[in-house]
Image: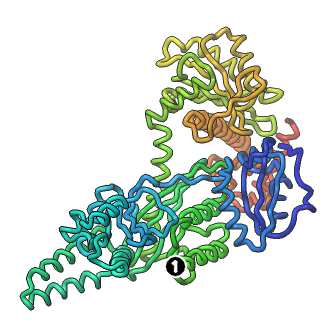
Amino acid sequence: MTVNWHPDPRSIPTDPGVYRFFDENNRILYVGKAKILRNRLSTYFHNPAGLLERTARMVTTARRVDWTVVGTELEALHLEFTWIKEFRPPFNIQFRDDKGYPYLAVSMGEEYPRAFLARSRLKDGTRYFGPFTKSWAVRETLDLLLTVYPVRSCEKSTFTAARRNDRPCLLGDIGKCAAPCVGRITTEDHHELAQNLVGFMNKQDPAVIDDLGRRMKDASDRHDFESAARFRDQRNALRSIAERSAIVLRDELDVDIIGFASSELSAAIAIFHVRAGRVRGTRSWTVDTELEMDPGVVLEQAIEHVYELESPPALIDVPFEPQSTSVLEESLTLRRANSTSKGRVRISIPRRGDRATLLTSVTKNAVLALSEHELHRAHDFVARSRALEDLRDAIGLPEAPLRLECCDISHLGGTDIVGSLVVFEDGLPIKDDYRHYGIASARDDTEAIYQLVSRRLVRLAEELPTMRYPTSLILVDGGQPQVNAAARALRESGVTGVAVVGLAKRLEELWLPNTDFPLILPRDSDALYLVQRARDEAHRFALRYQKSKRTKVLTSALSELGGIGPKRVRALIAHFGSPTAVRAATKDELVGVPGIGDETAQRIIDSFNSNETRG
């Protein structure tokens, strides 16, 4: 990979700041932050060939990079988060959370606070509790709370009508609203009532329940059985709410516990909100990671996202360190100071005890959220149908490609060329139909694609009568040159009814044969996800075949040496991780493998050298 543009390293400041990559249309592709801008940006241009695949794609797509210097790393963290939210760059991660889940909300910012069910959270002084799994759970909890804390729960129109008519609603008549609309309670007392409700939902202090029990007994001793019954009902209501969340931490801590799980292209975050030792709510987020980001970066941005609209607790447990722990702690402490809570925020990694056990449970929830996200996209029938229909419309096919085949080429610097072919029917992989190909020689990827597609089409003509669906689309990994090579093979084969399209890594655009401009699918479309998944599966299958071939070659070469048996060959590959690493190992590194002495190590090196000389 070559980058024909880059800033002069001497022009990049050494201050903390935020940088933005732009494409040729002045669209922001990526926003990042750095403690030292020059050091961070140099990593993109110092060794472009060493960049990971999707990062390299972003750099080669960009045409310029701008930076903004700030005073501290904390300011850089805030500015980065603000710009990501504002510009939504395609190569930055975008979190999708459980906004559809219901919350119990109390509008503390209003003159007469209102308790109600909400499905989104706003920065307006409203306090939120949850999320709950079902709407009825919120309504049932609210009904119990109004028995003890009869705050207003009606909408503004109902409240205004009651004030105008000087007549409360039914809840006021049955004692589940203090009826501030008709002046039965002062503004101050009603606000205190709402604060008590919020306080109980925050802590669920058992002392409140015990106090109601004592008041019930005292009223009973005075033979005030009506009051005793009311206190009993209030005690039972609060006890019922408290029993729904079991105690998970014996020391009654306030802590948020965050779990993390990731795959090649996605990540998931789960969080348990624990207050006074009880789980008060759970949430999860999923994200498609466009660039190969370090998990610490994803976790840092997730924590920023979590506390965008709410105050953090004093303690946050995580499975590993975020990218900038101390700066993040400072940012969250400032956010906490702006709310009613005080004290410094600490990010911790629990190693033992109840918190470590609970972190394991939260991490399992993150793993499940990630699996559900990937399975939903892969197996949801509606999503798959929509993907196939959108792909049909984008390419201009007469029918949806119910069977598509995807090809990929893999090699090591032009040697050991192999190809793969994977098959998807109804948007799902058919692994029994996967094929791999050895390519004896080829000048470049386009010739290798031509050979692979030509060989596949010979067999395809024979297999068509026995297929469940006829193959209607061949997808190749590459841009216009690769697509044109595949189209040439298709013309020469005489096979009809099959279209060819390429998926280029630059901006994940689709190329049709002999066209000047690509097709750009929406970043969040199911059709793009389908072709990406097919491309990644073909890439994985090609790499696995290539690795298998290299292992066989190495095993064969080593087996020819006296004293090197299968057990030692397996030990070498297990120790170094790959046949290529074994070939590159020094004598001292080989001797570090159990069972390999000085003499054996030297014979291995001599064997490799002699094979390379003959080659």
Where is residue 358 shown, x and y percent of the image? 43, 69
Q: Residue at x 22, y 83 (%)?
A: 212
Answer few, some or many: residues within 10 Å of disc 1's Cα (few below 14, many 20 plus, some between 14 and 19).
many
| 1 on left or right of 228 | right
- Write down the residue under mark 1: 314
Q: Residue at x 71, y 39 (%)?
A: 507
Displayed quadrant of residue 139: bottom left
Where is residue 419 shown, x and y percent of the image? 68, 30
Where is residue 52 shown, x and y percent of the image? 73, 49
Q: How many marks?
A: 1
Which residue is nearer to you in this view: 437 or 100? 100
Q: Residue at x 84, y 41 (%)?
A: 612
Answer whether residue 200 is visible to the viewer in this image: no
Answer whether residue 253 is visible to the viewer in this image: yes
Colour scheme employed for the rendering of this structure: rainbow
Q: Residue at x 62, y 50 (%)?
A: 289
Above or below, 57 relative to 163: above
Q: Quadrant of the C terminus?
A: top right
Displayed quadrant of residue 159: bottom left
Q: Amino acid at mark 1?
A: Ala
Where is residue 455 shown, x and y percent of the image? 67, 18
Above or below, 415 relative to 332: above
| 466 on left or right of 413 | left
Above or below, 387 relative to 499: below
Which residue is nearer to you in this view: 6 or 104? 104
Q: Secondary structure at mark 1?
A: loop
Q: Quadrant of the N terminus?
A: top right
**In the image, farthest residue toward the top:** 494
